[in-house]
């Protein structure tokens, strides 16, 4: 079996470098027998078995064949995340999930995503593979082309487009896809529904840095957005924990993250000018929005004019804005400390009166004072709507 020694080096900034030393070898006869006994003992308590082959030695041909035989004898489906060119060791499995490169390798044929017959060619070679090695189903993942389900024989294929998201790191995307696919199938989902869930999960995980996880809350929210009448840019509205994770991903990708905050009650030209100026100092702009309760504390019982959900969606709909979040504290300082932006920008504050900016400067960030556009304010708009102001 492989032996692994791990050494961790913590570098400056956001990066952690791990170095593994591995001895790759198949299990000994005693090791294989012990592991197989554990597999057989566990089968009664599981609904589905996943073999994720990293070609590190454990899933040798004899051991893999024995595990698949044990699963079939127990009536348990076996899903394979494959590796290498010889799939004969997976014979008898329920499903195999190669990516495009893996399918190319096993079939010995290049698959050109730009070709007009790309998907039909993928289906042809996937069916040929299933018939050759005696596997019931295949799901081929195709990166930006999505994924395709192929049954052995004459069944219907299913093509699913990818979930378009900003990619920070593709590490773990394949494992995430298989995990959610298998879990959904074990819970009774159809292949189409399981693929949709897995596709959404993969879309979430590639927006994170490193081998991250997808939480049940993230999946539930993403599926709700997908199947509701929610506006597509609603996904730019984050809770604090999710925003901190997204900011770290942007920063790890070398992007400068900017931050500004306010009530943004009735959006006007003054607001747009501030947002435009702030975006000029960063690659990604985060806007923190006072909750309804905090607006009332600041502005009085008749404000805000628009509720926090509406204000957040209006901001999220702007191309200038990359993320929106809510805060209810008297200042945005706790939020700034949680997400640690590279730049903070706001109108009319001196550093001595701006605790959020002092915090950013203290850890090496930048504070920018924005120019105010005179003649615009939400209070003046409200007065005019109430017939108390001028006509401008």
Image (cartoon, rainbow, N blue to C red):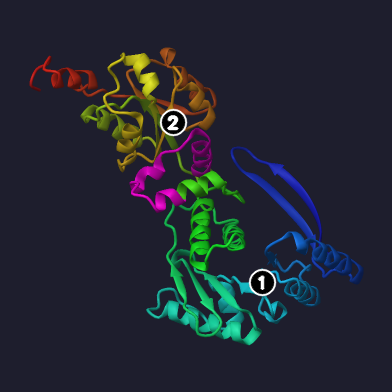
Residue 283, visible in the rendered structure: no
The residue at which mark 1 appears reads as 83
Q: Secondary structure at mark 1?
A: loop
- Say which residue appears at 51% left-offset and 58% top-offset: 197
User: Which image quadrant: the C terminus?
Assistant: top left
In the rendered structure, the answer to whether residue 211 lies left or right of residue 5 reads left
Which of the two residues, 182 or 20, is positioned nearer the viewer here? 182
The residue at which mark 2 appears reads as 343
Q: Is 9 situated above or below 47?
A: above
Start and end of the magenta stretch? Answer: 223-251
Q: Which mark is residue 209?
A: none
Which mark's residue is nearer the viewer, 2 or 1?
1
Quadrant in which residue 290 is drawn: top left
Quadrant in which residue 258 is drawn: top left
Prevailing secondary structure class for the magenta stretch in the rendered image: helix
Quadrant in which residue 180 is drawn: bottom right
In the rendered image, residue 103, in percent from the top left (x then y), is placed at 57, 76
In the rendered structure, the answer to whether residue 78 lies left or right of residue 391 reads right
- Check residue 230 for magenta coloring: yes
Q: Residue furthest right?
A: 30
In the rendered image, residue 381, in percent from the top left (x then y), is placed at 18, 22
- Check residue 46 for magenta coloring: no
Chain-order first, disc 2 or disc 1? 1
For label 2, count other residues whose C-alpha is less than 10 Å away and answer few (under 14), some (14-19) or many (20+).
many
């Amino acid at each position: 079996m492989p032996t692994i020694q791990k050494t961790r080096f913590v570098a400056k900034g956001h990066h952690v470098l791990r170095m593994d030393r591995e001895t790759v070898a198949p299990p000994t006869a005693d090791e294989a027998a012990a592991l197989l006994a554990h597999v057989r003992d566990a089968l009664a308590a599981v609904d589905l078995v996943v073999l994720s082959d990293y070609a590190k030695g454990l899933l040798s041909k004899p051991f893999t064949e024995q595990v698949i035989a044990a699963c079939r004898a127990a009536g348990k489906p076996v899903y394979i995340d494959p590796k290498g060119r010889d799939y004969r060791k997976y014979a008898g499995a329920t499903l195999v999930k190669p990516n495009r490169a893996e399918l190319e390798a096993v079939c010995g044929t290049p698959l050109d995503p730009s070709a007009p017959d790309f998907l039909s060619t993928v289906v042809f070679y996937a069916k040929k593979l299933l018939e050759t090695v005696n596997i019931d189903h295949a799901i081929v993942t195709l990166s930006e082309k999505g994924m395709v389900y192929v049954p052995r024989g004459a069944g219907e294929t299913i093509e699913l487009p990818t979930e378009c998201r900003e990619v920070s790191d593709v590490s773990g995307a394949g494992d995430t896809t298989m995990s959610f696919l298998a879990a959904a199938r074990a819970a009774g989902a159809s292949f189409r529904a399981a693929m949709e869930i897995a596709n959404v999960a993969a879309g979430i995980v590639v927006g994170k840095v490193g081998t991250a996880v997808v939480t049940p809350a993230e999946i539930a929210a993403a599926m709700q957005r997908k199947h509701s009448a929610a506006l597509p840019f609603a996904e730019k509205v984050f809770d604090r924990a999710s925003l901190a994770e997204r900011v770290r991903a942007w920063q790890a990708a070398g992007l400068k993250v900017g931050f500004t905050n306010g009530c943004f009650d009735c959006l006007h030209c003054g607001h747009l000018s501030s947002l435009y100026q702030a975006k000029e100092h960063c690659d990604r702009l985060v806007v923190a929005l006072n909750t309804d309760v905090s607006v009332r504390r600041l502005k009085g019982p008749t404000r805000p004019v628009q509720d926090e959900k509406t204000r957040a969606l209006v901001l999220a709909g702007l191309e200038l804005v990359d993320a929106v979040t809510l805060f209810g504290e008297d200042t945005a300082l706790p939020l700034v400390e949680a997400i640690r932006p590279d730049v903070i920008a706001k109108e009319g504050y001196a550093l001595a009166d701006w605790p959020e900016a002092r915090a950013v400067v203290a850890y090496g960030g930048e504070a920018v004072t924005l120019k105010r556009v005179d003649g615009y304010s939400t209070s003046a708009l409200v007065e005019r709507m109430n017939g108390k102001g001028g006509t401008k």
